[in-house]
Amino acid sequence: MTEFKNTLEILKKVAFFSQLEDEELQSVLSKLRVNEFSKGEILFREGEPGEALHVLLEGLIKLSKLSYEGKEQILHYVHPGGIFAEVVLFDGGPYPATAEAVENCRVGILNNRDMAGLVLSNSRLALDLLKILSRRLRAAQLTIRDLALHDADRRLARLLVKLAERHGSSTSKGIKLNTLITREEMANIIGTTRETVARILSRFQKEGRLHLYKGKIILTKEFLDEFDELIDPETKLPAE
């Protein structure tokens, strides 16, 4: 009973379900299968049959795809309260990406049939789901634009500003990024190599745009002012 109540309280904080009444949330919870995944465990792989919508209750999930050359392209990270694999609800196709647990995770899983019934019976859920899909589409379009029009410097700068919005904390030197993201992961997000990311970060440090201290990155105010225009105000990382 305690676990039931705890999961219900978590669901109330999930943006996708936040407008539902308690009775409706209990209906969702009755259909929700909660699984635990260890760090590094794969929840599903790109191309596998798409069977369910997932809700991250605790932990951190990485969504990625493989290029034709076998190189990982990180799409985004899912934080607690975020939903993912929602696209399979509509087309019944395979999962479009691979989901990996970056930390130990608790994940709620709703199979497609149950989720479709909930959406059809509640127009608010349907509208919220469309908003999420629209936001993901806009983010994908921005990524394509960046790869086509921006050099690696500006793609990395845009990523750092986004990380500052979600994981930043103020210090006397600037905004410190409180995230364990690696140089390799940064490279996989912006479509370049780890060596290029390391070289750009080193140059940014020499130019006084940021500080590298004990494995952490601190962005100066000048850096944030210079590159803030790279962020579309409508797509600043929402708490999913």
Image: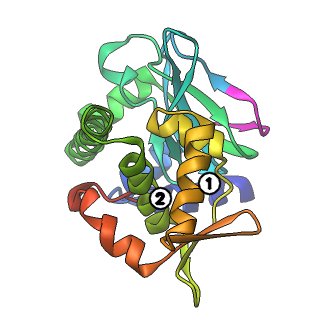
Answer left or right for 230 relative to 102.
left
Residue 227 x/y as whole percent: 32, 64
Q: Magenta segment: does it hold 76?
A: no
Measure how far apart labels 2 and 1 are at the Cα level. 33 Å
Between residues 119 and 101, which one lies in front from this camera angle?
A: 101
Say whether residue 86 is visible.
yes
Q: Identify whether 138 is placed above or below 169.
A: above
Element marked by disc 2? helix
Estimate how packed mark 2 is, as few (under 14), some (14 to 19) or many (20 or more) residues with alpha carbons within 10 Å. many
Please state the horizontal and vertical placement of residue 113, each as a whole percent of the image.
41, 21
For badge 1, the amino acid type reads Thr
Quickly name the residue at label 2: 160
Q: Position of residue 37 (x, y in %)?
A: 75, 36
**For residue 19, what is the image quadrant?**
bottom left
Where is mark 1, residue-wise?
A: 7
Per the rendered image, the range of residues in magenta is 31-42
Relative horizontal placement of residue 171, taking residue 136 as reference (left or right): right
Residue depicted at x 65% and y 32%: 100
Mark in front: 2 vs 1: 2
- The amino acid marked with disc number 2 is Leu
Q: Is residue 33 magenta?
A: yes
Q: Is residue 55 left or right of residue 120?
A: right
Where's the N terminus, which quadrant? bottom right
What residue is at 27 percent from the left and 54 percent from the top? Answer: 235
Residue that extends furthest to the bottom in the rendered view of this protein: 172
Sequence-wise, the earlier of marks 2 and 1 is: 1
- Helix, strand or loop at label 1? It is helix
Q: Residue at x 27, y 31 (%)?
A: 148
Q: Is residue 31 visible?
A: no
Residue 103 position (above or below residue 218): above
Question: Quick check: 139 above or below 3?
Answer: above
Crowdedness of circle 1 by 10 Å Cα count: few (<14), some, many (20+)?
A: some
